[in-house]
Amino acid sequence: MKDYWKHNLKYLIILLIVWFAVSFGAGILFVNQLNEIKIGGFKLGFWFAQQGAIYVFVILIFVYIRLMNKLDKKYGFNEDDNL
């Protein structure tokens, strides 16, 4: 059980670092460099600050679900057992 939570926390930390890098890095730190590129008439830095971080967050939710399903199978947890 301890290994399960160790892996779970590892996944959480990695995914939160990715989200932070996209939302803070692309939306704030590298906004000037990204603004030189345009998508649909909008500057890329603006797009990341307004839309990109949200899209990445939603994608990370699905990645987390997939990782946790694999982790549950690895450690023998099954949703049907709780019913």
Image (spheres, rainbow, N blue to C red):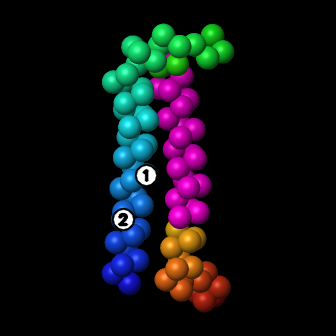
Asked whether, in this view, residue 38 is left or right of residue 23, the answer is: right
Task: Locate the N terminus and report the quarter of the image it occupies.
Answer: bottom left
Closer to the chain start, of discs 1 and 2, is 2
Give me the residue at 53% from left, 50% from top: 60
Q: How far across and down, in percent of the image, does residue 36 sit? A: 48, 10
* Disc number for residue 9: 2
Q: What element carries label 2?
A: helix
In this orientation, which residue lies closer to the viewer: 51 or 32? 32
Residue name at image x 61 percent, y 17 percent: 39
User: Are dots 1 and 2 in contact, CB under 8 Å?
Assistant: no
The CA span between labels 1 and 2 is 10 Å
Quarter of the image where the C terminus is located? bottom right
Residue 12's place in the image compared with 42, above or below, is: below
Magenta residues? Answer: 46-67
The residue shown at (52%, 68%) is 68
Q: Compare residues 51 and 83 and report the one nearer the observer.
A: 51
Asked whether 60 falls inside the magenta stretch, the response is yes
Residue 63 among magenta residues: yes
Give amino acid for label 2.
Answer: Leu
Residue pointed to by mark 1? 15
Q: In this view, does 17 lie above or below 23?
A: below
For residue 82, which quarter of the picture? bottom right
Q: Determine whether the residue tagged by mark 1 lies in a helix, strand or loop.
A: helix
